[in-house]
Amino acid sequence: MRKLLKSFAIAACGIILLNVSAFALPVDSKTECKNNSCENFKVGMYRVKNTLTMNLLMEKQKGERVKICLRNSAGKVVHEETVARSIEKMGRKFNFSEIADGRYTLEISNDSERIVKNINLTTNDVSESTARTLVAMN
């Protein structure tokens, strides 16, 4: 009887583990593009001189839906919008004068590709963070 209960408990745990893994969240398989250019869209971003405003310019293929998402350092969505399929070129101004200082991430993505921009906002300055390189020496 003990062996039967033990076997039943092991089988129940196995079934539960299989069900949990089946309902796990999918991994984001979007490839990250380099040099602000993906196969289906291109992005340009610059700061307006002497202001806390950044301009985002995007050119994409017609028929392609692109999502723009601005997140704070905690991962909370600050701004999100979807660019319609019929639009080929668009520009958007982001006014950072009304939000708190910190690090922000701007992600522009479609179904398969994405461009990620890191923005560092301090009291008097807003800038795109440059990519960092780690150098290890023995």
Image (cartoon, grey):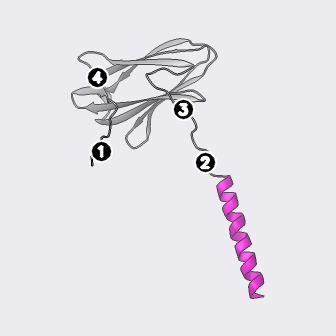
**Relative to residue 47, is residue 111 depicted above or below?**
below
Between discs 4 and 1, the one toward the N terminus: 4
Residue pointed to by mark 3: 31
Residue pointed to by mark 2: 25
Between discs 2 and 3, the one toward the N terminus: 2
Q: Is residue 48 magenta?
A: no
Q: Residue furthest left?
A: 124
Query: Percent position (x, y) of residue 86?
Result: 61, 13
**Relative to residue 7, is residue 112 depicted above or below?**
above
Q: Which range of residues does the magenta coloring cover?
A: 1-23
Label 4 secondary element: loop
Q: Residue at x 32, y 40 (%)?
A: 134
Between discs 3 and 4, the one toward the N terminus: 3
Report, in whole angstroms, how far the alpha carbon at label 3 lies from the one at label 4: 30 Å
| The N terminus: image quadrant | bottom right
Q: Residue at x 59, y 19 (%)?
A: 84
Of the two numbered discs 1 and 3 in the rendering, the one whose residue sits closer to the viewer: 1
Name the kind of residue labelled 4 in the image: Leu
Please name the predominant secondary structure of the magenta segment in the image: helix
Of the two numbered discs 1 and 2 in the rendering, the one whose residue sits closer to the viewer: 1
Report, in whole angstroms, how far the alpha carbon at label 4 lies from the one at label 2: 37 Å
Report, in whole angstroms, how far the alpha carbon at label 1 lies from the one at label 3: 27 Å
Residue pointed to by mark 1: 136
Q: Is residue 4 magenta?
A: yes
Determine whether, in the image, residue 50 is placed left or right of residue 4: left
Q: Residue furthest front?
A: 138
Label 3 secondary element: strand
Residue pointed to by mark 4: 52
Of the two numbered discs 2 and 3 in the rendering, the one whose residue sits closer to the viewer: 3
Determine whether, in the image, residue 4 is placed left or right of residue 62: right
Q: Nearer the viewer, residue 95 or 45?
A: 45
Report, in whole angstroms, how far the alpha carbon at label 4 lies from the one at label 1: 36 Å
